[in-house]
Image (cartoon, grey):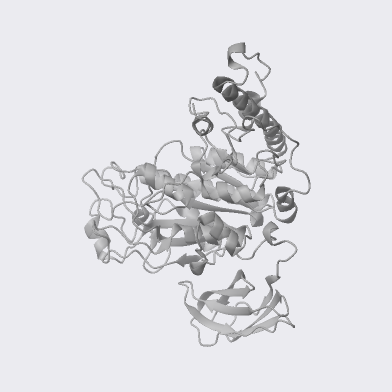
Amino acid sequence: MKRRDFLRTAGTAGVTVATLPGLVDGFSLRALASDETPMSQLLASSDRVLVLIQLQGGNDGLNTLIPFENPRYYQARPTIGIRKDQALPLTSTLGWHPAMDGFRRTFDEGHMAIVQGVTYPNPDRSHFRGTDIWLTATDADVFGSTGWMGRYLSTLAPEFPNVLPGEPLAVQIGNATSLGFIGAQGPMGLTIRDPEEFYRLVTTGQNEEVPSALQGDTPAGREVAYMRTVAASADVYARVVKRAADGGSNAVQYPNTELAARLKVVAKLISGGLGSRVYLVSWVNNNFDTHANQVVSGSPTTGTHANLLRELSDATRAFMQDMQQQGHGKRVAGMTFSEFGRRVAENGSTGTDHGTAAPLFVFGEDVLGGVVHGSDPDLVNVDNVGDMLMQYDYREVYASVLMQWFGTSTSLASQVLFRDFSQRELPLFRSLPTSVHDQGAGPRCGFGAVSPNPASSVVRFQVSVEPFAATALTLHSVTGKVVASADVDTWAGTASLDVSHLPQGTYVATLTSNRRTVHTLVSVQR
């Protein structure tokens, strides 16, 4: 068995093995990362956590956010379409699926942003290929072998795996390692089902005698030695994970569902002090592949898809409330993703087939929430098979997460994503953390006081920037249009924006200085 196959499939037979690589062949295990490594610097400078929720199977975006004022939606979906009076209110033309009250409340509280029409050029409708594209952050005609998160995490621990960070870089709650966590040197995270089980499995049986036939400098001997080293490195992290699990807690009651159980484990590890920066959770199967029986007995508000959306919505809200009540709300954010949306038209089995673009959700206390990026689904201008066209490339969302949440430079985000996607950076988060990659030379760029807010005429900003930095302050509508701009007094750290001409609503103020960008919300009232 090839090493990559071993690492990616270990655990699929019911025995979960840590998939953090050990050392290959002649390498020796050195001490855990010292205080001088980029990983330890990151832990000292920023403790932000990203939770990725994978909607495996292809989520039906049109029945997640219902365009109830569009007659073409009901023409294409006479059986499974959700009526306007059934949908939960979102905008004057869009409604939530009625099972998504948790998401609706989170959005209304300003802790969730929606990105409409997310896909990539020439989308692939295969589950396997589509998933690989999203996880590797590549074009449709490129077959990547490393994941976008794996490449980013590799920059935090450049000597990995010769030097292991003191904390696991990433944790997946599941069975087999996601391609998204694969770096050039192998998996950059570990996979567990349950902390206790993980600890029990990797701390027993490691001293068993290896038959002489499987020792020495032979192909079989090298593979056995490699796998035993994997187990040794897993043992290091098993103790770290168990310590966090034992010290962690949950402050809220979670629903009795598969996704909720996994998010409950994540919350417990975070509250217990585990230093991992990325978590990935998903369902076991391709649950969102709703070809048939998406609704039950012709009722669009019940059935498989309704149950999945309710589980997603309620579990995520419980997780966020848990983090907020334990004081971790501002440092934890999350994002959903799915390999594709579904077809515009329903099929003959009260379901939908593989499609293209779909909405993506970003949530967290420090998210610039209450905003829908992009326009309602366009059901007139469609592709050659009648499916929706792209509004946002998914890598534009990834770039925004890397730069705004983790504080990477534009050049590093471009390196991770293979090219620059920052031109259409989405304002998703309120502020940048300290970035390891810019330490020692990083210019200041941040908002201080914003007042009055809400405002009716002039908004005054206190900002923190370098005195000689090229600096700009702009105000955007929630659709991304620039509606106002102002000069910044970089010496005084002040700026003012006239909003007297703007209609009532929520706007995004963007401060850019020496290639750093931060955002904050401004409310205009009349």
Depth check: give the residue in front, 464 or 451.
464
- Above or below, 63 relative to 237: below
- Above or below, 487 relative to 345: below
Depth check: give the residue in front, 127 or 156.
156
* Residue 38 percent across, percent down from the top left: 71, 51
In the image, what residue occupies the spot 64% across and 73% down? 514
- Above or below, 153 relative to 287: below
* Residue 188 percent across, percent down from the top left: 60, 42
Which residue is most to the right? Answer: 35
Which residue is most to the front? Answer: 217
Looking at the image, residue 319 sits to the left or right of residue 481; the answer is: right
Could one spot residue 106 in this view of the protein? no
> Residue 463, located in which quarter of the rendered image?
bottom right
Depth check: give the residue in front, 83 or 231.
231
* Residue 406 percent across, percent down from the top left: 62, 57
In the image, what residue occupies the spot 67% across and 28% down? 232
In the image, what residue occupies the spot 56% across and 76% down? 523
* Residue 177 percent across, percent down from the top left: 52, 37
Could one spot residue 494 in this view of the protein? yes
Looking at the image, residue 167 sits to the left or right of residue 317; the answer is: right
Looking at the image, residue 465 sits to the left or right of residue 350; the answer is: right
> Residue 380, located in which quarter of the rendered image?
bottom left
Callout count? 0
